[in-house]
Image: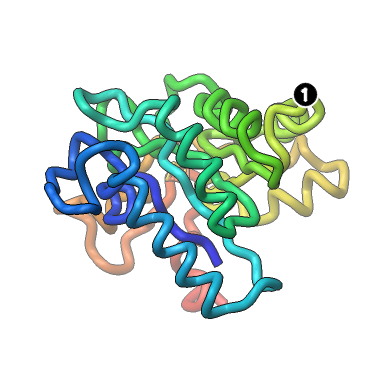
Amino acid sequence: MEIHGAHGYLVCQFFSGADNQRTDRYGGDLEGRMRFGLAIVEAMRQTIGEKFPIIYRLGAEEKRPGGITLRQSRAFAKQLQKAGVDAFDISIGSPEGSKAMNPSPGPKAKMGTYVPLAEAIKKEVTVPVMAVGRINRPEVAEAILTEGRADWIGIARQLIADPQWPLKVSGGRSDEIVACKSCNTCFQPLFGTRWKFGDPICKVNPEAGREVDLA
Ligand code: SF4
């Protein structure tokens, strides 16, 4: 079970000093801003027992005034692990479309652009840490793992572009991978005004989003 505490969603807003303007015990200083996320984890752990894994997607940094800093996130990660988190998925705090830090980095962003955040959190916790953010190529993913910068890799858009990516990589057919362009056209159904139901959602995979119809 993964708690989404990144990308400007509600849980992340409580942690962000830029968003959280509360004056009660769930706001104010760092301790207050950590309280909501910690309370969720503690309540989940009590409810689901010790054996069911909880992953926390932590927005580890925002480059905006008053926003989340990596120093704050490092402290938060330690507390979250104590509260019962079994693994971390490390992304950024800013919402989709943010200019300073975009959760879905565009084509000009360096591949694995947010890996340093995962690497920093990994130094603070003893549970597995996932790296995400434009990790499209197998050699990039492999290097992150072998260099010990993260314990596992999260891939999203690349699997829309080519759902066969894991099979091609494990089967030694990496040269057949259809590369994601990081163009973010697949966000049009969410944010676009001209997209209509049935329109393609991916620049390189015409079947994406139409799997049932095409079957
Ligand atoms: S539309 Fe396709 S190619 Fe473009 S970012 Fe989304 S998945 Fe990648």
The location of residue 193, given as percent across then percent down, is: 15, 53
The location of residue 186, given as percent across then percent down, is: 38, 50
**Type of the residue with mark 1:** Glu
Q: Is residue 171 left or right of residue 76?
A: right
The location of residue 91, given as percent across then percent down, is: 47, 39
Q: Is residue 42 above or below residue 163?
A: below
Q: Report which residue position mark 1 lands on.
A: 147
| Quadrant in the picture for residue 152 | top right
- Tell me what residue is drawn at x 46 percent, y 40 percent: 76
Q: Is residue 126 left or right of residue 49?
A: right
| Quadrant in the picture for residue 29 | top left
- Tell me what residue is drawn at x 41 percent, y 36 percent: 92
- Tell me what residue is drawn at x 55 percent, y 70 percent: 45
Residue 123 shows up from this direction: yes
Please state the quadrant of the image where ligand 1 appears. top left
Q: Which one is nearer the viewer's eye here, 91 or 163?
A: 91
Q: Which one is nearer the viewer's eye here, 103 or 8?
A: 8
The location of residue 84, given as percent across then percent down, is: 58, 59
**What colour-coding does the image apply?**
rainbow
- In terms of secondary structure, where does tag 1 sit? loop
Q: Is residue 102 left or right of residue 53?
A: left
